[in-house]
Amino acid sequence: MLQQQRWDWSQTVLLNFHFRRQTIPVPRPEPVFVAPALPSPPEQAPQPAYNLMEKEQPRNPSRVQFHCLPLISPGQYGTKFVFDGADVEQSDFQYMFWSQQQLTTGSIVYPKTMHKRWWRVEQQSPYERGGFLTLCNISTICPDFSQP
């Protein structure tokens, strides 16, 4: 590096610095895909209120033990008790079961299943073959049903 000579810049030719800038117009292609018009959704007739009597008791009901905290008056609950029943239908937000126990609307029910969820009784109607069909929604109250 110490022996390196300096370049004579007067003899250097810079390449690629003598060009003309040209703009070439590019034609825009027409859109090839045109989305078809979506059909309007069919009008649905209003569904009647949910009738508990339409639901049949299952042929092979799964027997379940239920813990209950009965509602006596708004904000006041009675003593806890346990009763037996059968699953009829369960979804993420509603639970329906059959039992011989009559419950008050607003009572808290906890079925001993693997789902680990508390339910609030919304509706109960007598079943034509005996017992009651009970429709429940998710409860915000989660009492302790463990044995003392």
Image (tube, rainbow, N blue to C red):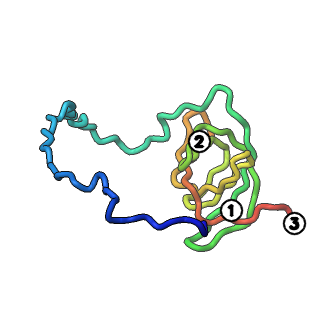
Marks 2 and 1, Cα distance to the nearest angstrom? 20 Å
Q: Is residue 110 left or right of residue 41?
A: right
- Other-residue count near label 3 (Cα within 10 Å), few / some / many at <14 / 14–19 / ≥20: few
Label 3 SS: loop
User: Dots 2 and 1: beta carbons under 8 Å?
Assistant: no
Q: Which residue is mark 2?
A: 90
User: Dots 3 and 1: beta carbons under 8 Å?
Assistant: no
Residue 50 lies in quadrant: top left
Q: Is residue 68 left or right of residue 119?
A: right
Pick whichever of labels 3 and 2 is earlier in the sequence.
2
**Residue 37 percent coordinates (x, y):** 18, 34
Q: Amino acid at mark 2?
A: Gln
What residue is at 68 percent from the left and 39 percent from the top? 86
User: Dots 3 and 2: beta carbons under 8 Å?
Assistant: no
Pick whichever of labels 3 and 1 is earlier in the sequence.
1
- Observer-side mark, 3 or 1, equals 3
What residue is at 81 percent from the left and 61 percent from the top? 146
Marks 3 and 2, Cα distance to the nearest angstrom? 30 Å
Residue 140 seen in this snapshot = yes
Q: Which residue is mark 1?
A: 69
**Residue 59 percent coordinates (x, y):** 64, 26
Q: Amino acid at mark 3?
A: Pro
Label 1 SS: strand
Residue 36 seen in this snapshot = no
Numbered circles on residues, count: 3
Pick whichever of labels 2 and 1 is earlier in the sequence.
1
Q: Which mark is residue 148?
A: 3
Q: Is residue 44 above or below residue 148?
A: above
